[in-house]
Image: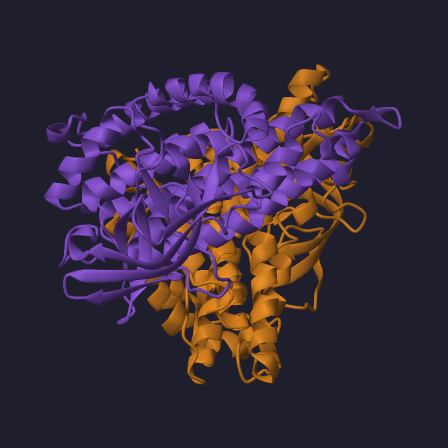
Chain colours: A purple, B orange
Amino acid sequence: MQEYKTEHPFDLTLSEDQQMTWDMLRKFAETELRPHARQAESDGRPSDELLEKIKSLDLIPLIIPEVYGGMGLKQDSVSNALALEALAYGDLSLAMSVSVPLLVAQIISEHGSEEQKAELLPKLVNGSIFHVGLGINNTLLSTDPYQSSVSAEENGEEIILNGSKTGVAFANQANTFLISASNESGECNLYFVNKDQEGVALEDKEFMGLKGVPLSQISLSNCKINASHKLGGHNYSINYESLVDSARIGMSALALGVCQAVLDYVVPYTNERVAFGEPISNRQSVAFMVADMAIETEALRLMIYKSAALKDLGEDFHKQASLTNRFAAHHGMKIGTDGVQLLGGHGFTHEHPVELWYRNLRAIGIFEGGAGV
Amino acid sequence: MIHPLLPNQLQKTQETMRMAAEFILRPISRKYDKAEHEPPLEMEQLNQAAAAQKKESGVSDDSAKSMDLGGRNLWAVISLEQMCWGDVGLFLARPGTGLGNAAIMAVGNPDQKDLWGKRWAAMAITEPAAGSDSKNISTTAILEGDEWVLNGEKIYVTDGDRCDCVVVWATLNKDMGKTAIRSFIVEKGTPGFTVARLEKKLGIRASDTATLIFDNCRIPRENLLGGKEEIETDIDAAKKSFGGAMQTFDNTRPMVAGMAVGLGQAALDMTRAMLAEEDYEDNFGRSMHQQTAIQNELEMLEAELEAARLLVYKSAWMMDQKMPNSKEASMGKAKAGRIGNKISLKCVEICSMQGFSEDYLLEKFSRDSKILDIFEGTQQIQQLIVARQVLGKSSSQLK
């Protein structure tokens, strides 16, 4: 029955480092991200000024090895999850404008070949954080999430890619893309595709949510790349399932930040909003909705911690990540919709952020590869 | 360090208690479900297994070694979770400890703990006209010389027939509301104390549920639990006093919630085993396009169960850390109570006529699970407690 090995006791206390990072990022989320969420939505991207502030958090150089100019900090998954939650408390789109490049940096640092790392990581350190776009989201409805809607035909030194990917963040600022594609034997790997390559077409897309981050579709038509453009090199195989699972813990952690934001918004609102002579939160039908939000938010938090802790132990975390992803998708959306409901007609308008959170929370369980732990 | 995982030693506890549940409880599950009101004789074995595990794991107290493993309340939750994976009704019928024991340990003075701590103590709160509304009880306790005289009727007393003694909630003065409520230890065989009848129930039939009558029942003055005879007139002190009594529930709710988690896991495991006979396999993480409806359903139910389990572990861990856990205990109880019930009913549906059949235990799990969302505070009471804390409301604002 033993599922994993650890001598460490059950514990839910933040370490000193985690607490420091949490306080710093949570403050950044409240003072820099939340106030600019609407503006970024209407502009379809964060302002340059805000991007500079996001870059100055130095989250990306932090994890890049020192030989490539970074600080080489080996960050654990639990701490990564905490950071994502703290950022998304401000705004999901704006949090993703750092979590996506961070995921790219994680992937290249961990899986890239020496050449790939030497070429790309210094660029990411030096402020071009969107140099590499990430194409994980499938365009076909029925594609297995652990497979790709892009096919890779591997013929010796040449690989031919066909198909499309969507939800690629900051594609217009990217010079190269990291695209997942499935080969004939059913393995899914990542491949670098240059923007100016023949057979590559980009198209800006708008979605119901995540409007503060520019998203594009990338279509590959008989796109021929050299085998050395496979992530990790010619003979490298990535554990794609594990990558998706890690990214799902990341997305769940972002969802958690938004859920906490909804909860913290409806508590004062329902306490202050008066109907029939008293605060609406004096009524059980309202109060119980808030109680359930608090219960499921806390449960989601613990599920994320557990998935991340299992990953840190080096144990199989596929099942735990899957459960967390399901839970985040279901209860995240429930909290999103209840958040609007509790504000009634006011919640339906742009007067309050709950309608924005509602739209963003619909991405959870759908959007893959938006953050990693 | 955030680490919501169980150390090896506690996983060993899980394993041992799971085996005890499988080999001691499961074989007699149906027998005592059918033979309601017949005391199960095989329970001593389970107690011995639990005691041996407790000794072996070294988690029995608040010592440093025990805390290194996570503490004794977490240990208790995970071991009873496994026992209830076997059978909740039989677990509750285990001789030796009842909810009264938790009350004695929580609010008793040292002498009372010495004298009564090792006796099997049931808990009598509910009355025909007062359930969740426990401040409205009407059983009275009047001091006459050196004796308390109890009068009233208590219902739904788990272990009420088989226990050695009962912790009885009574009021010193009905007009004073909750400030006048105290709990008293009444020993079995005390004149004026009778077991009027046993309930026939939907589930947990192995456990006795009694109606108790106190008719001029005289008990020693020192049997007032906690020993506080005077009624506070100061409103804050009064609130604190009743709150103290209610705090017992902060300790017992994680335990009852743990029972629901164990039962939910049992239903899921049995459903998977039955489906495997017809070649079912799990398919975690895939999308709706790859999963069958049952794979999809079981994944979601498993996620809900895992969520409940972690909330419950957290509330028990907080007890061990001596942190106030009232909100968390209610969160865990609310989530585990409703999800244990939902899972067990869904599993019956998934297994169709086999699920509904008494040839298997799924139908029994689905009957047993209902009480776990009712006793020790109903779903709605838990939500009320959570809501008041989250919204910062008093019981007069949020009724």
Check the image and report above or below for B51 versus B116. Answer: below
Q: Which quadrant is the N terminus of chain A positioned in? A: bottom left
User: Would you say B164 lies left or right of A320 here?
Assistant: right
The answer to whether one can see residue B242 in this image is: no
At horizontal 68% and vertical 56% (from top left) the residue drawn is B156
Q: Position of residue B376 (x, y in %)?
A: 61, 48
Q: Which quadrant is the C terminus of chain A positioned in? A: top left
Q: Position of residue B297 (x, y in %)?
A: 54, 66
The answer to whether one can see residue A276 in this image is: yes
Q: Position of residue A173 (x, y in %)?
A: 37, 33
Question: Toward which corner of the image does residue B327 lie, by quadrant?
Answer: top right
Q: Position of residue A299 (x, y in %)?
A: 50, 43
User: Would you say B220 lies left or right of B63 here?
Assistant: right
At horizontal 49% and vertical 54% (from top left) the residue drawn is A326
Disc tally is: 0
Viewer-proximal residue among B164 and A19: A19
Check the image and report above or below for A89 versus B18. Answer: above
Viewer-proximal residue among B98 and A79: A79
User: Would you say B226 lies left or right of B388 here?
Assistant: left
